[in-house]
Amino acid sequence: MRIHSYEKLWLAASMVLILGFIATITYGAVGLGIEMIGEEDETVAPNEIDDDERFGEPRVEQVGPDEYEVYVIAQTFSFRPNPIEIPANSKVTFHVTSRDVIHGFEVPGTNINSMAIPGQVAQLTVVFDEPGDYGLICTEYCGDFHHQMEGEIVVVPEDEFDMTELSVEAPDTVQPGDEVELNATVRNGQFEELETTVDAEIGNQTFQRDISVDGQSAENVSFSVDSDELGEGEYEWSVTVDNYEEDGSVTVAPNETGDEETGDEETGDD
Ligand code: CUA
């Protein structure tokens, strides 16, 4: 069979076009690193989200010297945790899921853009090299307040980033003669040891204690004052570690009468 040379030319041209299409589609699917949710087969049942070890407590977790994992829940109409605080120049992997309906997870101006689908966990790995506040928005219509569903990613300079948490247990009232005791727990979520100072104040008494907290563990410190030194009345207290402060007040007073549960008052004075 003889093929006309024009026909050969068009045949060749259409082959080139077809190969071009295939190449473009392949590049778009593979070359850009865009992945579909669920390719890693990470899942979580929406009704078990609160008991899940990843999402039960949405958080930032350090997993290597400059490597962090962030577990995020999108729900009507917020993101948890919020804000998400991470260090600059570290490899951060977001694991995002939804508690209820389909939401979006997008940081405008970056290539962070994913759907948050109930039951599935999207993974995105990013390195932020510019410290600053980045807005996080929901990009899927999810209900009446979809337009208000936003969050914040705070990228902190590496040398200022910490994962210190302070919590304090303190009594609301203390009987005259008893100790006023503040129990502070300093948790260090990072790998490196934390060397710091805990400052406390009860009324006009001040305390200071140097502590070192191992990586990914916690230390307890307690401070106490004899309430007789304070006298009856209401006193402010505070506990400070680096940039974290907890405060409250404690009242030194004899048990009120008429209090049914603690109505076992004998004689007020010893
Ligand atoms: Cu969530 Cu829109």
Image: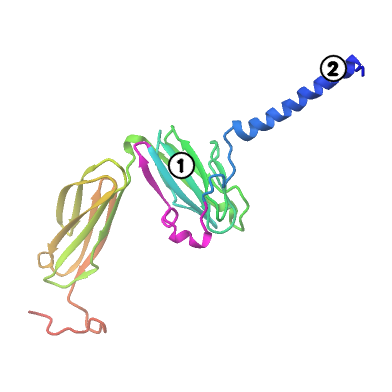
**Considering only vertical position in the picture, is 69 above or below 148?**
above
Q: Tell me which residue sits at (48%, 61%) in the image.
A: 48
Q: Amino acid at mark 2?
A: Leu
Q: Classify mark 2: helix, strand or loop.
A: helix
Write down the region rendered in magenta. Answer: 43-66
Q: Could you say which is closer to the camera, residue 140 or residue 224?
A: 140
Q: Say if 89 sits above or below 1 in the image.
A: below
Q: Residue at x 13, y 72 (%)?
A: 176
Q: Is residue 62 magenta?
A: yes
Q: Position of residue 102 (x, y in %)?
A: 59, 54
Residue at 17%, 83% (x, y): give it: 265
Instruction: Give coordinates of residue 49: x percent, y percent.
Output: 48, 59
> Of callouts 1 and 2, which one flags the residue occurring earlier in the amino acid sequence?
2
Say which element carries label 1: strand
Q: Quadrant of the N terminus?
A: top right
- State the residue position of label 1: 93
In the rendering, at what x and y percent does residue 129 appear? 43, 32
Mark on residue 9? 2
Neighbor class of circle 1 (other Cα within 10 Å; few <14, some 14-19, many 20+) is some
Q: Is 41 positioned to the left or the right of 259 in the image? A: right
Quadrant that contains the C terminus: bottom left
Q: Which residue appears farthest toward the top when viewing the image?
A: 5
Report which quarter residue 260 is drawn in: bottom left
| Amino acid found under the numbered disc labelled 1 | Thr
